[in-house]
Image (cartoon, grey):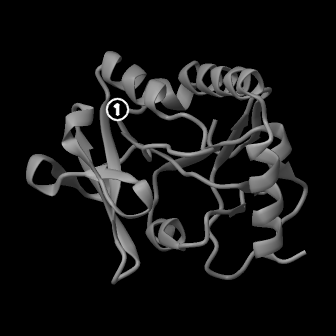
Amino acid sequence: MDKSNLRSNIIEKLKTLSAAERKNIEQSLEENLLTSEIWKQSSVIGITISHGFEWNTKSIIEAAWQNGKKVCVPKCQPKERKMDFYLINNYDQLEVVYYNLQEPKLEETEKITKNNIDLLVVPGLLFDKQGYRIGFGGGYYDRFLTDFTNKKLSLAANMQVVDKLPAELFDVPVDDVITENGFIIQGGL
């Protein structure tokens, strides 16, 4: 199966989850992340603002703030097909942009260089046991990760993890995948 078919199939599965199933998975993902050593050791967290059927990241962001961690979120530049991360201290520093995404207001936030992000939570739809992923199709994270040297992990339900995905030369695997049952791969700890 090619990437677009794999992407479509998992999106349909994720959309069929009941509210209770989704909430249980999200609570487990959050707990497994927040109790991990990599979370405890990281002071700057890069993470997206979730929307739609994505796993909720707002409670993770709020936990980071409560723990005195810095949070940075991506700002996409569609013409260049790249993104940069900006520090946010509250949700008022966000604005709604294309596709109903929330991104940082540049005039109210500070850009952070990628080597200052200790832990990057990388979104995706499907993951394999080597850390390769199928994302949403824009390629923004693939480009960002090419020279990102710090810790990168993804949150995924068990249903989003398969043995092997088609990987291309430009694909960069994440170090860890955390599911509701814990770490699937553990590249750094």
Q: Is residue 111 left or right of residue 83?
A: left
Q: In the figure, 99 relative to 183: above or below? A: below
Front residue of 54 and 180: 54
The residue positioned 21% from the left and 32% from the top of the image is 89
Vertical relation: 68 (above or below) 130: above
Reading the image, the residue beneath label 1 is: 43
The answer to whether residue 166 is visible is: no
Which quarter of the rendered picture does the N terminus lie within? bottom right
Residue 63 x, y percent position in the rendering: 41, 20
Badge 1 marks a residue whose secondary structure is loop
Q: Is residue 10 visible?
A: yes
Residue, far left: 107
Relative to 94, does residue 78 appear above or below in the rendering? below
Q: Is 118 situated left or right of 113 in this image?
A: right
Residue at (65% x, 61% y) in the render:
173
Displayed quadrant of residue 169: bottom right
